[in-house]
Image: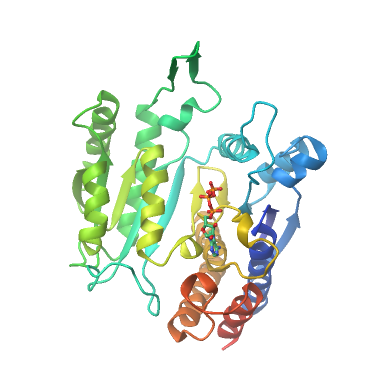
């Protein structure tokens, strides 16, 4: 029997609302799947907590994240809560959590669901690609470092290691092996996105990509420079399956990916390592919508489905796999029906109404 302890961090802004919606869905799916037991522990953390206590992520909460089977996080950060140096609390807490959990790969599906309109007219064959973002290195490894010389010069350094690159590229190929390929023709493909024509660090990233690709001869490979990729994702999104890239490029292309399939309210993510998994929507705390019960909870609900999928694989647990499939199918049905669309998708359904509709679809 799969029995898991989940830490939930509702965080700031719309975070608590989308977390409450997601916990309702998760509890319902757990009730409906035989052999699945979940214990959820919620903790305060984030910018509002920092304002109250001077700490965003207390040590005991971090310890609990490290001892749990998985962590669900909704959104951290409030623009008016700043540290004494003027920076926001969010990057500090998120980088600290990612580093402590050693979650080196961020998996970000970019999927156009039936019933959702893409702003593109180039997606007749569908959009179903995944961005695999290296999550600890690249430009972000300079976070907390960097250098300012007087009033005139500032630097941050990109760090690419063979081992860090090997691990994230390996995740990309294993993911491609499980998927049904690019919508255009079903060809399983991993595309390396870089800037290897200009920078040695990205040329090195591409070399390591080629080394790992050689161990996966059944999967087609492709390469693209990041500037061209931002064009291709708009012009021919159906031609892509799995894209793997350095941290900063993944950060940027993830938002472009969300934009072509209905926006941030539909963009889930899974941040995984060898020991830990952190599951959160790609969006931030959207303070403009907080407290109004209007945020779209589907990105967070789909992130919980990704959590079950990861637990299923890690523990060879068919029940967790079934929970993942059921949640995604229920969200898909709600979107396809078009009856409970939240405001960001052009509807009037509240956060709690969307959650209730997903739960109703789960019970069918
Ligand atoms: P961060 O830097 O923390 O990622 P951000 O500044 O990029 O945050 P978000 O908080 O992600 O911004 O949101 C940007 C805008 O997108 C919000 O102001 C909101 O209008 C919209 N948005 C984000 N998430 C959602 C959601 N779940 N439902 C509806 N709209 C959303």
- Residue 26, quarter of the rendered image: bottom right
| Residue at the image position 49 percent from the left and 55 percent from the top | 269
| Residue at the image position 68 percent from the left and 49 percent from the top | 68
Instruction: State the colouring used for the structure image.
Output: rainbow
Say which of 18 and 292 sits in front: 292
Whether residue 137 appears in this view of the structure is no
Horizontally, residue 288 falls left or right of residue 192, namely right
- Residue 215, quarter of the rendered image: top left
| Residue at the image position 75 percent from the left and 40 percent from the top | 50
Horizontally, residue 79 falls left or right of residue 160, namely right
Say which of 314 and 333 sits in front: 333
Across and down, in percent, residue 23 comes to: 67, 67
Horizontally, residue 194 falls left or right of residue 313, namely left
Across and down, in percent, residue 102 comes to: 54, 37
Q: Quadrant of the N terminus?
A: bottom right
Say which of 193 and 66 sits in front: 193
Considering only vertical position in the picture, is 320 above or below 253?
below
Please identify the residue farthest to the right as the structure is shown.
Answer: 53
Considering only vertical position in the picture, is 290 above or below 157?
below
Please identify the residue farthest to the top as the structure is shown.
Answer: 150
């Amino acid at each position: 029997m799969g029995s898991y302890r989940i830490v939930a961090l509702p965080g700031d802004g719309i975070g608590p609302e989308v977390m409450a919606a997601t916990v309702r869905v998760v509890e319902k799916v757990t009730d409906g799947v035989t052999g699945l037991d979940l214990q959820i522990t919620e903790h305060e953390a984030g910018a509002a907590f920092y304002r109250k206590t001077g700490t965003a992520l207390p040590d005991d909460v971090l310890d609990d994240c490290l001892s749990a089977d998985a962590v669900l996080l909704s959104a951290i950060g409030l623009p008016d809560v700043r540290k004494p140096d003027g920076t926001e609390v969010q990057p500090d807490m998120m980088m600290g959590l990612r580093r402590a959990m050693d979650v080196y790969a961020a998996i970000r599906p970019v999927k156009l669901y039936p019933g959702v309109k893409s702003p593109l007219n180039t997606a007749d064959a569908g959009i179903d690609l995944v961005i695999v973002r290296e999550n600890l290195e690249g430009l972000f490894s300079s976070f907390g470092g960097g250098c300012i010389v007087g009033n005139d010069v500032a630097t941050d350094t990109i760090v690419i290691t063979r081992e860090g690159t090997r691990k994230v590229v390996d995740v990309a190929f294993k993911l491609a092996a499980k998927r049904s390929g690019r919508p255009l023709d079903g060809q399983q493909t991993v595309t390396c996105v870089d800037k290897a024509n200009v920078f040695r660090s990205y040329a090195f990233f591409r070399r390591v990509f080629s080394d790992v690709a050689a161990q996966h001869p059944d999967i087609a490979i492709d390469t693209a420079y990041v500037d061209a990729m931002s064009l291709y994702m708009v012009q021919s999104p159906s031609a892509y399956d799995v894209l793997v890239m350095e941290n900063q490029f993944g950060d940027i292309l993830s938002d472009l990916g969300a934009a072509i399939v209905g926006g941030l309210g539909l963009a889930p993510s899974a941040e995984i390592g060898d020991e830990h998994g952190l599951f959160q929507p790609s969006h931030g705390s959207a303070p403009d919508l907080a407290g109004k019960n209007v945020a779209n909870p589907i990105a967070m609900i789909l992130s919980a489905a990704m959590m079950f999928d990861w637990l299923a694989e890690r523990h060879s647990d068919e029940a967790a796999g079934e929970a993942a499939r059921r949640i995604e199918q229920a969200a898909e049905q709600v979107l396809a029906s078009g009856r409970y669309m939240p405001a960001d998708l052009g509807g009037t359904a509240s956060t709690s109404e969307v959650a209730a509709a997903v739960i109703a679809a789960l019970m069918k």
